[in-house]
Image (spheres, helix red, strand yellow):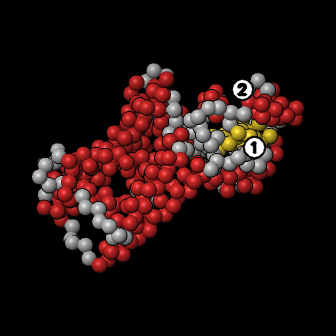
Amino acid sequence: AADGQTPLHRERPVSGFAAFTRDPAQFLRARGWWLTALLIVLGGLLLNLTPCVLPMIPINLAIIGAGAQNGSRGRGFLLGGIYGLGMALAYGVLGLTVVATGGFFGALQSSPVFNLAIGAIFVGLALALFDVFPIDFTRFQGGHGPAGRGAWLALSMGAMAALLAGACVAPVVIAVLLLAGRLHGEGVPGALLLPFLLGVGMALPWPFAGGGLAFLPKPGGWMKIVKNAFGLGVLLMALYYGRLAWQGFHPAAAPAGDGIAAGDRAAWNARLAEARATGKPVLVDFWATWCKNCHAMSRTTLRDPAVVEALKGFVFLPVQAERPAEEPARSHLQALGVSGLPTYLILEAAAAGDRR
């Protein structure tokens, strides 16, 4: 709350993963490194169940399981481990990039080219699962040993799976990246390993899946049904990314509703001046049309009767950031410390006119 206004909600004690996602830095200070690292690894493990990764299981098993077709548990385990290493390295490199450049994870998902490319990949995978054309990875596995082309394929596909999963559960990934960046800024170099730990958690099941495939029975007719179901899931993800790409190539001509565009200095100052005249604090909502979590908040939390009642004590200001990595939005977001979407800021009425 600000200036004695009604708070948005009553604070309720939270624990476990909920406390970590709310304020990871505070959770680390209260609970210590070991529990924080354990939760990050657990969060990475759960990423395998997201809609971006789960439907790709048949393709992933074809990559790491091909070596096990010869009855070699060791080879399947090794390829599964390499596949998992790709996941861990992807998040490790992502963490280093974010800390070094000051960028944020959601900016990549705002690129229409990126979304179009991912949608095209999902279309290809869906058609393969529907047997429109075969994707045969076995030719990459033979004759070169575990360190040959098959290993590089497993490594690269593991990295891709990690990035796709991150797009589905951006809040968890962003929480870890923000924690790493904040602690690194406070002089804790070891914080750079936290995104890597997220990838390690995601990688945990895959060596065992690869090793166990050598003893699985040959697929029967039931696998055809399962494969088609996964194909439908992949196709739905392709449509989702295609929609994001379309929105990116055709951005809104003007901000939706009574909002303003990020980087519009004149509109920003005018709205803050109006708010200062009312004496109410300002609740700023940074959002974008491509941000699925923004839409989820609008459909649920912001429509909750208790929240609607509490918001009567605030001036609500939506700020649309369709291109967060481009000017003039980039400078606006960086000046206010916005590191991902959605972000909500409360500006006190007395100081709102000084904010730029």
- Residue behind mark 2: 356
How many numbered marks have been drawn onto this rendered protein structure? 2
Give left or right: position of 275 versus 72: right
Q: Secondary structure at mark 2?
A: loop
Task: State the separation of the CA atoms marked 2 and 1.
Answer: 17 Å
- Looking at the image, which is closer to me, 214 or 309? 214
- Name the spot of residue 78 as percent of width and height, x first: 20, 49
- Looking at the image, which is closer to me, 355 or 3? 355
Point out the residue furthest to the bottom here.
221
Does 210 sit above or below residue 229?
above
Q: Is residue 279 visible?
A: no
Q: What residue is rendered at 53% in x and 44% in y?
A: 111
* Between discs 2 and 1, the one toward the N terminus: 1
Q: Is residue 300 visible?
A: yes
Q: Secondary structure at mark 1?
A: loop
Res 193 → quadrant:
top left
Circle 1 Cα neighbour tier, 10 Å, few/some/many (<14 / 14–19 / ≥20): some
- Residue behind mark 1: 259
Amino acid at the residue labelled 2: Arg
